[in-house]
Amino acid sequence: MASWAQKIRAHGASKQRAARKPKPEVQTTWAQTRFADSEAGDPGAVIDVHFIVEENTVTLTDEKGKPIGGKASSYVLQPGETALQIAKRMALANWRKSDAPFNRALKYQSLGIA
């Protein structure tokens, strides 16, 4: 007959948790939203892009690794594609869908008329 201690050890051994999969590393890059114009003194504009790669799937995230944008912000990589180029492409598509382009500064050509 097993002692109570052996029963507890046996019970604990049967309830071992499976090893947790580590969180993927949040990678950061940038995507250009406006070209620089040296004549006008405009340095251009960029947006930060945060993303994770799990297996063959690229997912846009915030800087802490929380996915943003639902299913539209995930993409399964195809042969010949890199996670970096897809993350930039997805971020630019999301930026264009937002109202960010609407609030940009308008550039007018100087006509020289006073």
Image (tube, helix red, strand yellow):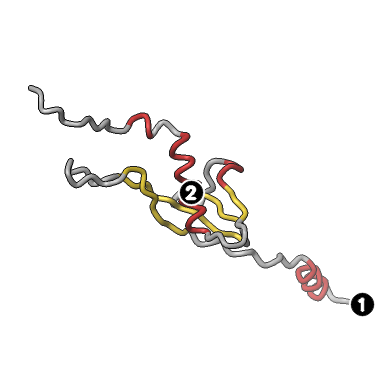
Question: How far across and down, in percent of the image, does residue 69 sit?
Answer: 54, 41
Does 62 sit above or below residue 77?
Answer: above
Question: How far across and down, in percent of the image, does residue 91 sit?
Answer: 47, 46
Relative placement, left or right, of 3 versus 88 is: right
Q: Identify the amino acid type marked 1.
A: Met
Q: Identify the amino acid type marked 2.
A: Arg
Q: What element carries label 2?
A: helix
Instruction: Say whether residue 64 is visible.
Output: no
Name the residue at 44% across, 37% down.
96
Sequence-earlier tag: 1 or 2: 1
Relative placement, left or right, of 20 versus 82 is: right
Question: How far across and down, in percent of the image, does residue 59 sit?
Answer: 55, 51
Q: Mark 2 — residue? A: 89
- Residue at the farthest top position: 114
Q: Mark 1 — residue? A: 1
Given this view, does label 1 or label 2 mark the residue nearer the observer?
2
Q: Which of 89 and 3 is in front in this view?
A: 89
Does 102 sit above or below residue 79?
Answer: above
Name the residue at 32% across, 43% down.
34
Name the residue at 19% across, 47% down.
38
